């Protein structure tokens, strides 16, 4: 189906909701409980469950699930967690990408998940682990599967640099620009309610290079493998399922956005692509880690968490190892210099859509070339933030800004993935916007005792930047995707 038809379907869903006064998502047929042995497999360029039913991932990122589901004395917001799971289920979402690892530092940082799952090497916060148990148990009850992300390139969860720091006596880490909720300018009134600003000034390439030592550091790799063992062999305290024997965990993801070696020069019109480097230690590391996971959890799938901005050569090499079951892509038009959230022009939006078209077209073809399906597991766009008057005291990312560009872009990029899925020559198997903020709003936020507000955006970024709120049109677009794909699968 062409994108224009996807837009027509979306319009009919919205008009139907208005005329009946009901949520459009209530017309969806939801998946039943995920049985422990209903594992998903890859066959060609598609996913199938144990009953050989085609699976399309109507996903969303919900990275903080383990912390939200924890007890209140660990900063959790259990009722919010349940409310938001119900909201996502009602919208037709059947897949969540969540963190299954966060690492602590002796010197607390305001831009890192707190409290972490693993405060120090091999020492786990059981109450946060129980939060992860609750995530999986409640997801299974709602017919949702998970991508469990085990590590991270970036600072907000600890990730690669923390493993390196641990092996070197907790040496200091030089952090790139990261959000500090307590920095000026502050929201008027009592403290602890934002807004904040970026306060650290380190260089991203220096930070990446430091973290990437994990690819060659045997001590850091041993710590990471110990974490893998701990998580995979965890017995869920809610439903008794061992994680590696639970089909709710569809996928183990090695890391969020692992980066290649920083090159001497970047290529392409946006300076994103990296020249081929067959000796890059990232490549054998992915092979080793994917093999290690597969040996322990052969029934579940494995993916890398790679973006794709680095170009065709790297994207294919990263996803070629035999134990990597499917590929991923992340598309970030503002972060990569394509789109300006303060520019209201049609030309600005058109540039973002043109980039997305090329990106999805290319990665779909690359998936065909290597014979593996592709999951668009991250993309996003800011609200119409040109409407927020910062000089008059508005928060730059205030939620009262409209979402005209965001909605148009969501329709476009989701439509591209749906087109790819429906095509006999396409390789996309789903989409996952970044990220679900649900009932959170920056205007009502209040730091908990751990300094967290749990926006859809992670704590190293401005709260509300890419959030998908429970009343946003973006959620209706996700619902339209689900209904459209369900009808297609039923008819084929």
Image (cartoon, rainbow, N blue to C red):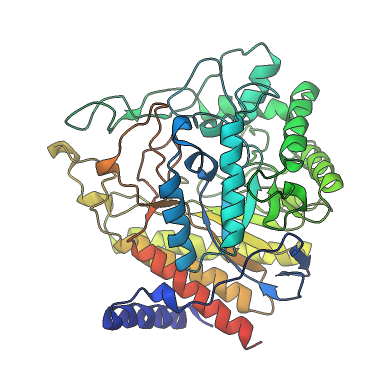
Residue located at (59% from left, 71% from top): 31
* Total numbered labels placed on residues in the image: 0
Point out the image quarter for the C terminus.
bottom right
In the picture, residue 130 is in which quadrant? top right
Q: In this view, does 374 lie to the left or right of 68?
A: right
Given residues 141 and 62, the one toward you in this image is 141
Query: In the orientation shown, which residue stands out farthest toward the left?
Result: 392
Q: Position of residue 148 (x, y in %)?
A: 64, 47
In the picture, residue 35 is in which quadrant? bottom right
Q: Position of residue 113 (x, y in %)?
A: 50, 32
Residue located at (61% from left, 31% from top): 126
Q: Is residue 201 placed above or below 421 in the rendered structure? A: above
Residue located at (42% from left, 55% from top): 83
Q: Is residue 285 placed above or below 481 in the rendered structure? A: above
Q: Is residue 19 placed above or below 398 in the rendered structure? A: below
Q: Is residue 119 placed above or below 329 in the rendered structure? A: above
Q: Is residue 27 left or right of residue 157?
A: left
Query: In the orientation shown, which residue stands out farthest toward the bottom?
Result: 491
Q: Position of residue 164 (x, y in %)?
A: 67, 21
In the picture, residue 351 is in which quadrant? bottom left
Instruction: Mark yes or no: residue 266 visible.
Output: no
């Amino acid at each position: 189906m062409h994108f224009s038809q996807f837009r027509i379907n979306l319009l009919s869903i919205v008009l139907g909701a208005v005329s009946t006064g009901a949520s459009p998502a209530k017309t969806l047929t939801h998946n039943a409980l995920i049985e422990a042995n209903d594992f998903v497999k890859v066959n060609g360029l598609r996913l199938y469950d144990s009953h050989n039913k085609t699976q399309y991932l109507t996903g969303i990122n919900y990275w903080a699930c383990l912390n939200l589901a924890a007890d209140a004395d660990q900063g959790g917001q259990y009722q919010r967690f349940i409310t938001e799971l119900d909201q996502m289920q009602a919208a037709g979402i059947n897949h969540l990408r969540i963190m299954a690892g966060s690492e602590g530092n002796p010197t607390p940082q305001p831009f890192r998940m707190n409290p972490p799952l693993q405060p120090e090497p091999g020492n786990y916060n059981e109450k946060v682990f129980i939060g992860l148990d609750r995530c999986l148990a409640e997801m299974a009850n709602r017919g949702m599967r998970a991508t469990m992300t085990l590590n991270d390139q970036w600072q907000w969860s600890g990730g690669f640099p923390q493993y390196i720091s641990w092996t070197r006596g907790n040496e200091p880490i030089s952090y790139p620009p990261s959000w500090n909720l307590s920095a000026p300018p502050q929201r008027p009134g009592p403290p602890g309610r934002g807004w904040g600003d970026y306060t650290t000034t380190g260089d991203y390439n220096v930070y990446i290079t430091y973290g990437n030592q994990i690819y060659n550091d045997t001590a850091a790799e041993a710590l990471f493998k110990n974490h893998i063992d701990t998580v995979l062999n965890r017995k869920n305290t809610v439903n008794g399922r061992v994680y590696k024997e639970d089909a709710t965990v569809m996928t183990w993801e090695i890391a969020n956005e692992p980066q290649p070696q920083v090159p001497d020069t970047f290529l392409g019109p946006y300076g994103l692509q990296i020249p081929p480097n067959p000796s890059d230690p990232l490549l054998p590391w992915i092979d080793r880690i994917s093999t290690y996971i597969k040996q322990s959890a052969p029934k579940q799938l494995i993916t890398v968490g790679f973006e794709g901005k680095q170009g065709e050569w790297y994207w294919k090499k990263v996803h070629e190892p035999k134990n990597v079951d499917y590929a991923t892509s992340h598309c970030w038009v503002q972060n990569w210099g394509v789109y300006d959230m303060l520019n209201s022009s049609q030309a600005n939006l058109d540039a973002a859509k043109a980039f997305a078209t090329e990106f999805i077209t290319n990665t779909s073809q690359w998936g065909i070339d290597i014979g593996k399906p592709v999951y668009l597991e991250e993309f996003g766009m800011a609200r119409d933030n040109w409407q927020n008057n910062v000089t008059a005291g508005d928060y730059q990312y205030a939620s009262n800004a409209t979402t005209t560009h965001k909605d148009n872009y969501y329709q476009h990029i989701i439509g591209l993935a749906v087109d790819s899925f429906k095509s006999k020559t396409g390789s996309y198997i789903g989409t996952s916007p970044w990220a679900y903020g649900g009932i959170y709003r920056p205007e009502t936020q209040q730091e908990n005792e751990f300094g967290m507000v749990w926006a859809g955006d992670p704590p190293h970024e401005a709260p509300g930047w890419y959030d998908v709120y429970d009343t946003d049109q973006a959620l209706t677009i996700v619902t339209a995707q689900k209904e459209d794909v369900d009808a297609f699968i039923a008819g084929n």
